[in-house]
Amino acid sequence: MTDEMRIQVMRGGPYVVSGGVPLKEMAPVRTLNDEPVAWHELREFDESRDMYALCRCGRSNDKPYCDGSHANGEWPEAETADRGPMAARAGRVEGPAGVMLDDESLCIGAGFCGTRTANAWDLMGEEGGDARERVADMAAMCPSGRLALLAREGEAPVEPELPREIGVVPGGPLWVRGGIPVESADGAPWEALNRRTLCRCGASAAKPFCDGAHGDLHFDER
Ligand code: FES
């Protein structure tokens, strides 16, 4: 077994995952009003291999694994996401709860940032109460890493301790948890964040990351 967990983007091909990374299927838990409020582990893949390949083009007949279908014709495989750090790209929302970083380019539309009655942006303007905890919870459940809460500018984000694993989101991306490094096909590392989402439908305009395009595509798991 290799000691380092890592995900390598292959040019024109899959994600090669090495280091014995656990692979699980994870889905949002929704209220009766269809608001996502938590994550639920549906199953753990029986993955005992040190190395395995996950589909990146959306064509595999063995999802989430690659079956070589990427080779059946052209697909838009180029990694087009911004290479800079999230903190440099993100907007700032400041308030009594601290500083919320908001990097819209990472958004996948998961919807953990608001309910019918409150959202992270409004909560940032609230004095006292549990506004800070609620923003921190919303940010922590956002799989893409769009939102991050800092006590003050320059400090490290308040982040949950996540196990180093990959969550396969039904009809959606791969949720890379715990800061597992992702390496571009050109060998350059992508910024390691505690929460990241990788496109597996092949339609994102910000590859290798998900940009929510799977929703319009009605990405079919099968
Ligand atoms: S999985 Fe491809 S855009 Fe989300």
Image (cartoon, grey):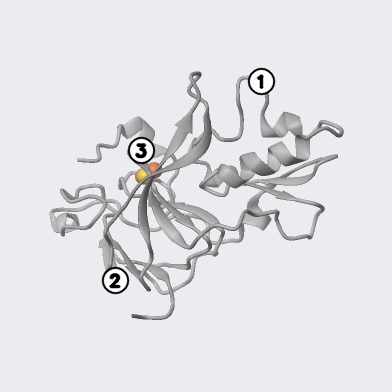
Instruction: Tell me if the residue at label 3 has its CB under 8 Å from ligand 1.
Output: yes
Q: Are marks 3 and 1 in contact (CB under 8 Å)?
A: no
At a point 25% along the width and 37% down the height, the residue shown is 220
Mark found first going from the N terminus, 3 or 2:
2
Task: Check disc 3 and report the residue beneath it.
Answer: 214
Q: Mark 3: which amino acid?
A: His
Q: Secondary structure at mark 1?
A: loop
* Residue indicated by mark 1: 117
Residue placed under numbered mark 2 in the picture: 51
Which is in the foreground here, disc 3 or disc 2? 2
> Which of the two labelled residues, at mark 3 and mark 1, occupies the earlier sequence position?
1
How far apart are the two marked residues, 3 and 2, measured between alpha carbons?
Answer: 26 Å
Farthest residue toward the left?
72
Residue at image location 56% in from the left, 43% down from the top: 141
The amino acid pointed to by label 2 is: Met
Local crowd size for mark 1, using a 10 Å CA cut-off: few (<14), some (14–19), many (≥20): few
- Establish if 217 lies above or below 150: above
Query: Quarter of the image holding residue 26?
Result: top left
Per the rendering, the mark at residue 216 is: none
Estimate the x, y position of residue 178 in percent, counting from the top left.
52, 61
43 or 90: which is nearer to us?
Answer: 43
Q: Secondary structure at mark 2?
A: strand
Q: Viewed as shown, does residue 186 lie left or right of 125?
A: left
